[in-house]
Amino acid sequence: MAGGHVHALYRHGDTRLHRLPPHTKIVAAFGFVFAVVATPREAVWAFGLYAAVIVVLATYARLGVRFVATRMVVEVPFLIVALLLPFVAGGDTVSVAGVELSHEGLWDMWNILAKATLGLASSIVLAGTTQIPELLRGFDTLRVPRIVTAIMGFMVRYLDVVLGEMRRMRIGMQSRAYNPTWIGQLRPYATSIGSLFVRSYERGERVYLAMASRGYAGHMPAATTDHATAGVWVGVLAVPVLAWAIAIAAIGVA
Amino acid sequence: MSTPTIAVSGLSYRYPDGTEALRGVDLHIHPGERVALLGPNGAGKTTLVLHMNGIHMPQTGTVAVSGLTLTRETLMEVRRRVGVVFQDPDDQLFMPTVWEDVAFGPQNLGLQGDALHTRVTTALDAVEVADLAQRPPNHLSFGQKRRVAIAGVLAMEPQILVFDEPTSNLDPASRRELTIILQGLGITQLIVTHDLPYALELCQRAIVIDRGEIVADGPTAVLLGDDTLMRAHRLELPFGFRLDPA
């Protein structure tokens, strides 16, 4: 089977950001996002600074505008909901180009738009510089329960396999002239999802047999973990510390 | 005579729906042998294999691995001694990286640190995939996946390797590379296969199983040359394939 693109979020590179121990990057990204979320929405300047931080990091990691922009598309459905808020929220209104918009709604829209975009952008920088096995190791180092990281690992591992089966089933259907043009013809599609579920379930059993054959007795082996020196921590934590400084200043001003 | 690596005697097994999958199977495999297990679809090959490492427990009869009888108590040791390489490597490579996958078995045995490192490196080297150690399994070719699956089993330091259809889905070049690797392993092997030329190439001895019973056991070339036997058990050599006169 051809290799899939589960690593589509990763940008191959060898910058310092790529090489940092993964758990430090996870801590930094979470710290940064919490600072963004805690910032009052009226502090527009603060969001500008956050965006600047992201741009600097993405540039440093050589992620490229196109890479980041195409991965931001996932945000669009949320933005559509946010864009409705000025029209549906109540309270005082302001007139924009002859349309009466809710003042409160506009601020809500801005709040969601700014925070969601920054949060997503920071996770793109994290995922773009950290391979999935490294991310899992990072969570292990941060002592996320082993069973949780094991489940995440299985999910990532078999996503590709299941998608591959789905693709083959679809090709099988299309090869026999299946070309749904109206909704009533979707029935075979629905049943194929059912059989995909059954196949995945059976695969789960085979995987378990293979695990049992190699001595699995109910406990995943201890995960490998990383170690970061104090120097590395200081460097990495500079990002969330800066973000929190901005957030605290913004809270003070507001 | 040496203690057989695998000693199966009087083994019968009936599936919960009543289907009789194995009927009084007797089988010995001795250290250093490489044996082919042949038979048509549904003959009971896989059921027999799943008894050898205790995935199925014998309902009647016994299975012993190097003198150790399979029971609930000896299950873990039997699984360590018998390494099964399954047909679909995607079922067997479940960890995020090749390295972690090969380390899975030894870690379950309690290995860590340098001992673990050595064990994993040795296994990866044996199938010539050391350069893939940090790759996620979903980025490997099918032939690479198969070899990594073998490494994962080798890392358990088993006394016998059992392969379920090792050549399925392999292109001729990967198939040949696998042959060289299997020949170089120097470990007792049982190869379950429909690929009769492969059985002939690799195994001096073959066992034919049909409808849950062993119907023939002897030199591979002799069995494959016996037209009556072959036809009776739905075994066919590929078109154009000829056995050299023995």
Image (cartoon, rainbow, N blue to C red):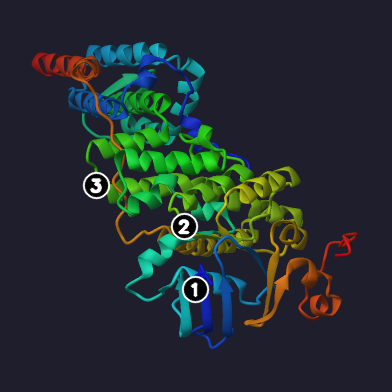
Q: Which of labels 1 and 2 is toward the front?
A: 2
Q: Is residue A226 left or right of residue B39?
A: left
Mark 2 and 3 residues: CB-CB less than 8 Å, in contact? no
Q: Quadrant of residue B161?
A: bottom right
Q: Earlier in the sequence, mark 1 or mark 2?
A: 1
Residue at the disc numbered 3 = A145
Q: Nearer the viewer, residue A228 or A78?
A: A228
Label 3 Cα neighbours within 10 Å, binned few <14 / some 14-19 / many ≥20: few
CA separation, marks 2 and 3? Answer: 31 Å
Q: Quadrant of residue B221?
A: bottom right
Identify which amino acid the numbered label 1 is placed on. Answer: His
Chain containing the residue with disc 1: B
Residue drawn 37% across and 20% down? A19
Mark 1 and 3 residues: CB-CB less than 8 Å, in contact? no
Which quarter of the figure is the N terminus of chain B placed in? bottom right
Residue A80's spot in the image, x, y percent?
Answer: 41, 33
Identify which amino acid the numbered label 2 is placed on. Answer: Pro
Residue at the disc numbered 1 = B51
Q: Quadrant of residue B117?
A: top left
Do callouts 2 and 3 point to residues on the same chain? no
A238 over A128 or under it: above or below: above
B197 over A249 or under it: above or below: below
Chain containing the residue with disc 2: B
